Image (cartoon, rainbow, N blue to C red):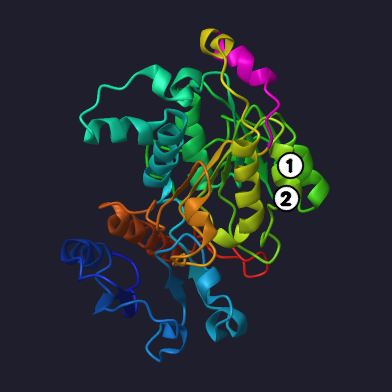
């Protein structure tokens, strides 16, 4: 009798830009007693991949992507398994997406200004307050239906929205629509049941077909790769402008052609017709017939470059919310990222495939 062969000693090196999470590491030591752990409290270092202390079997990233290391020798010249923390960001980023969208659609900047001025404002003082439309029946399009996009869809469906999804490769069967990465319990769309329609492709025609599906709100959540760099520019914004879509980007700033986005946002304001009494009485009808151009708004947690220079015109783009890459922040971040690592340590012991393993050819 016995507990099986004794596991060989292994070493886990953690290099992270915050103090050692002792309770989490104690949990890992208890689950994997053969594992010794070294923790280094470091600021981010671009040359970390050449550190001689880096393990040679598995590297787990606390980020959702690995674009920041794709030019390093470890990525290009080794076969070391690389895994990401994709899946842990869905709850907090979906909340940011919803927050910023509602701030825009409900003219919250005006409401907050009234409060700071101790002013009981009137609808007549702001035309946008008289043309608010709730999200019921509107269409949300998720460009990149991964863990974050699935949680945004989860929330959007609860608000009565229709959801459509776009992926790089086709998902023709029910099984192919499943989320096979890390899932925070109770979140997302594990079985891929929420979208009313799925679209896919790596070519411009497929992307344009997707964007032409009467979209009211586009959420950009694709990984940054050579294929997605400047994926959305003037031609794509022109398609979205047919319904003056709102755009949320929580991916990377380089996905968008930023000057083209500014132009699309500016075009909407420049083409605003005067608000008549009929608009006040029946705003939805008036909006549908208004000869508007461009996009009605955008929320960007990522820009190109980062940090965004003080004099960049994006700061002053109309109806545009810019935040400094903070949508993923949560006190649960580290714990969930370590949960992904723990799941993969268990899978290695059992001889099973890793979750969230990076495909170097695809770039994610």
Q: Secondary structure at mark 2?
A: helix
Residue 182 visible within the image = yes
Reply above or below: 316 against 164. Answer: below
Q: Nearer the viewer, residue 261 or 50?
A: 261
26 horizontally vs 237: left or right: left
In the rendered image of this protein, does residue 348 appear above or below residue 249? Answer: below
In the depicted view, which residue is nearer to us: 313 or 58? 313
**What stretch of residues is rendered in magenta?**
282-293
Residue 290, placed above or below residue 230: above
- As helix, strand or loop, the secondary structure at mark 1 comes to helix
Q: Residues within 10 Å of mark 2 (few under 14, many from 20)?
A: some
Mark 1 nearby-residue class (10 Å; few <14, some 14–19, many ≥20): some
Label 1 close to label 2 by CB (< 8 Å): yes
The residue that label 1 is drawn on is 238
Q: Is residue 189 visible?
A: no
**Residue 362, position in %: x, y?**
66, 64
Return the x and y of residue 315 as percentages of the image width and height. Answer: 47, 55
Quadrant housing residue 42: bottom left
Question: Picture quarter containing residue 247?
Answer: top right
Identify residue for label 2.
234
The residue at the point 20 percent across, 70 percent down is 20
């Amino acid at each position: 009798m016995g507990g099986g062969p004794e596991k060989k000693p292994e070493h886990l090196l953690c290099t992270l830009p915050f103090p050692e999470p002792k309770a989490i590491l104690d949990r890992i030591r208890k689950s994997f007693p053969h594992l010794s752990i070294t923790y280094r409290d470091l600021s981010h270092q671009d040359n970390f991949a050449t550190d001689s202390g880096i393990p040679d079997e598995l590297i787990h990233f606390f980020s959702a992507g690995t674009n920041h290391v794709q030019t390093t020798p470890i990525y290009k010249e080794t076969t070391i398994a690389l895994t990401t923390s994709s899946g842990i960001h869905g709850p907090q980023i979906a909340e940011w997406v919803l927050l910023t969208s509602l701030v825009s659609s409900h003219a919250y900047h005006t409401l907050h200004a009234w409060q700071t001025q101790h002013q009981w404002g009137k609808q007549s003082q702001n035309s946008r307050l008289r043309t608010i439309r709730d999200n019921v029946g509107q269409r949300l399009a998720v460009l990149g239906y991964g863990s974050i996009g699935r949680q945004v869809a989860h929330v959007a469906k609860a608000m009565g929205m229709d959801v459509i999804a776009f992926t790089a490769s086709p998902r023709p069967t029910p099984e192919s629509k499943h989320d096979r990465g890390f899932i925070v319990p109770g979140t997302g769309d594990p079985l891929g049941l929420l979208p009313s329609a799925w679209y896919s492709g790596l070519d411009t025609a497929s992307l344009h077909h997707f964007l032409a599906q009467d979209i009211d709100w586009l959420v950009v959540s694709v990984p940054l790769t050579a294929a997605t760099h400047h994926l959305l520019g003037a031609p794509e914004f022109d398609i979205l402008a047919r319904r003056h879509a709102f755009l949320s980007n929580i991916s990377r700033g380089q996905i968008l052609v930023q000057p083209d986005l500014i132009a699309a946002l500016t075009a909407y304001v420049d083409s605003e017709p005067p608000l008549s009494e009929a608009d006040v009485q029946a705003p939805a009808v008036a909006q549908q017939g208004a000869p508007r151009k461009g996009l009605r708004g955008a929320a960007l947690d990522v820009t190109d470059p980062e940090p965004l220079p003080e004099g960049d015109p994006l700061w002053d783009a109309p109806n545009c919310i810019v935040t400094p890459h903070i949508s993923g922040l949560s006190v649960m971040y580290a714990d969930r990222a370590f949960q992904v690592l723990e799941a993969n340590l268990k899978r290695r012991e059992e001889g099973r495939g890793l979750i969230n393993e990076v495909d170097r050819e695809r770039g994610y």
